[in-house]
């Protein structure tokens, strides 16, 4: 069948979620999380992801997130126990008049669990996500990622942060290149040197323009992340490209800010749905992979510990 496909195919990636619908979910989540003193949080997160994924479509077919509050609660408890142990050790060191060692221990511990949290988070979230019944998956190796992560951290420290852009791109490349969509695989081809130059330009021009160029800096980063991503199956591929402009980011940011200020924060749901809609409206996909030929290859993974630890560390930044 694939032999008779046209050279290029187009794909429609869209987000259909409405702020009003999401607002109902957000309010209930907030109230139940407060009433239960935080215990409901894993169920709140599961409901949020189920809504956001369920409102995202590819060629009019919705994605689905199959993770549950029960799965996330188990990981939530493990994450709390881990951070409680960190706090106890730091407290003991401070109590015995070794505050510097206590703080160093805390930061060293957080850095040490970061790659483990990233690995676990992507392994869980991808395996619990599907489209037309075809699951995603993450095939990264935890031991390998930990080794690479500390090598990148070391280079970043000894270069006084200069290696940072290479670390960001290397981490992004490793994670994305290990994500599968059925029997298709993602690939990312960013370069740390290009990323460094782009951010130096954005930093200095933002200062020179009293912050006005920040929106174009945002656009450059968004475009760089999207334009270097692709999906491959055999000798066929789908390329991603961004159509966002600096002006688009100005409009998105200013209107979001007005919504948050005028609603005293209650417009959060509309800001989230507007932002996701904006991203997908400015991502174009073109290639020659027939999505009907995707085959199931990935397994379910129900341990959400990494997902919850990454939540505590606010690590939702790679994809």
Image (tube, rainbow, N blue to C red):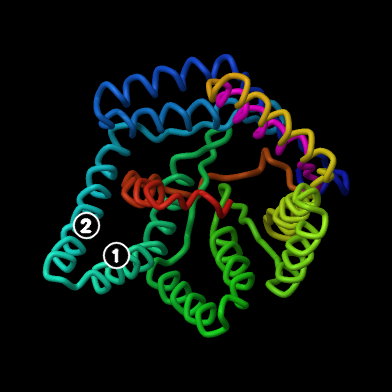
Residue position marked by numbered label 1 in the rendering? 106
Label drawn at residue 87 = 2
Please give the name of the residue rendered at 24% of the width and 47% of the height, measured from the top-left corner. Answer: 80
| Residue count near mark 2 (Cα–Cα under 10 Å), binned few <14, some 14–19, many ≥20 | some
Compared to residue 51, the image places residue 227 above or below, namely: below
Q: Are marks 2 and 1 in contact (CB under 8 Å)?
A: yes
- Extreme residue in the right direction: 7
Circle on res. 225: none
Q: Is residue 164 above or below residue 120?
A: below
Residue 161 x %, y %: 57, 75
Identify which residue is drawn at 43% across, 73% down: 144
Q: In the picture, residue 104 is in which quadrant?
A: bottom left
Residue displayed at 53% across by 34% down: 133
* Magenta-drawn segment: 267-288
Q: Secondary structure at mark 2?
A: helix
Based on the displayed image, in which of its 4 quarters is residue 193 positioned?
A: bottom right
Sequence-earlier tag: 2 or 1? 2
The majority secondary structure of the magenta stretch comes to: helix
In the rendered image, residue 291, in percent from the top left (x then y), is placed at 69, 41
Is residue 276 magenta-colored? yes
Q: Nearer the viewer, residue 299 or 144?
A: 144
Left or right: where 277 falls relative to 118:
right
Q: Percent from the top left, x then y, of residue 87?
A: 21, 57
């Amino acid at each position: 069948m694939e032999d008779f496909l046209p050279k290029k195919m187009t794909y429609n990636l869209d987000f259909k979620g409405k702020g009003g619908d999401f607002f109902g979910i957000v309010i209930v989540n907030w109230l139940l999380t407060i009433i239960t003193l935080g215990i409901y949080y894993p169920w709140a997160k599961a409901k949020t992801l189920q809504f956001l994924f369920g409102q995202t479509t590819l060629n009019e077919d919705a994605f689905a997130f199959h993770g549950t509050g029960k799965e996330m609660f188990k990981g939530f408890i493990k994450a709390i126990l881990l951070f409680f142990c960190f706090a106890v050790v730091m407290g003991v060191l401070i109590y015995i008049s070794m505050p510097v060692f206590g703080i160093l221990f805390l930061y060293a511990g957080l850095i040490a669990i970061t790659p483990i949290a990233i690995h676990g988070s992507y392994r869980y979230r991808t395996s619990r996500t599907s489209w037309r019944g075809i699951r995603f998956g993450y095939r990264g190796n935890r031991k390998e990622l930990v080794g690479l992560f500390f090598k990148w951290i070391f280079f970043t420290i000894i270069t006084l942060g200069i290696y940072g852009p290479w670390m960001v791109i290397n981490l992004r490349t490793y994670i994305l290149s290990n994500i599968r969509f059925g029997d298709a695989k993602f690939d990312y081809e960013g370069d740390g040197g290009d990323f460094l130059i782009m951010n130096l330009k954005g930093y200095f021009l933002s200062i020179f323009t009293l912050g006005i160029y920040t929106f174009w800096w945002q656009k450059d980063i968004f475009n760089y992340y999207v334009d270097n991503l692709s999906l491959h199956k055999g000798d066929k591929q789908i390329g991603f490209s961004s159509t966002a402009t600096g002006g688009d980011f100005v409009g998105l940011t200013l209107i979001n800010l007005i919504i948050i200020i005028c609603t005293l924060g209650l417009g959060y749901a509309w800001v989230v749905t507007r932002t996701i809609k904006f991203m997908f409206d400015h991502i174009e996909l073109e290639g020659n992979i027939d999505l009907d030929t995707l085959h199931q290859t990935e397994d379910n993974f129900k341990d959400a510990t990494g997902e919850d630890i990454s939540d505590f560390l606010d690590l939702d930044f790679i994809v």
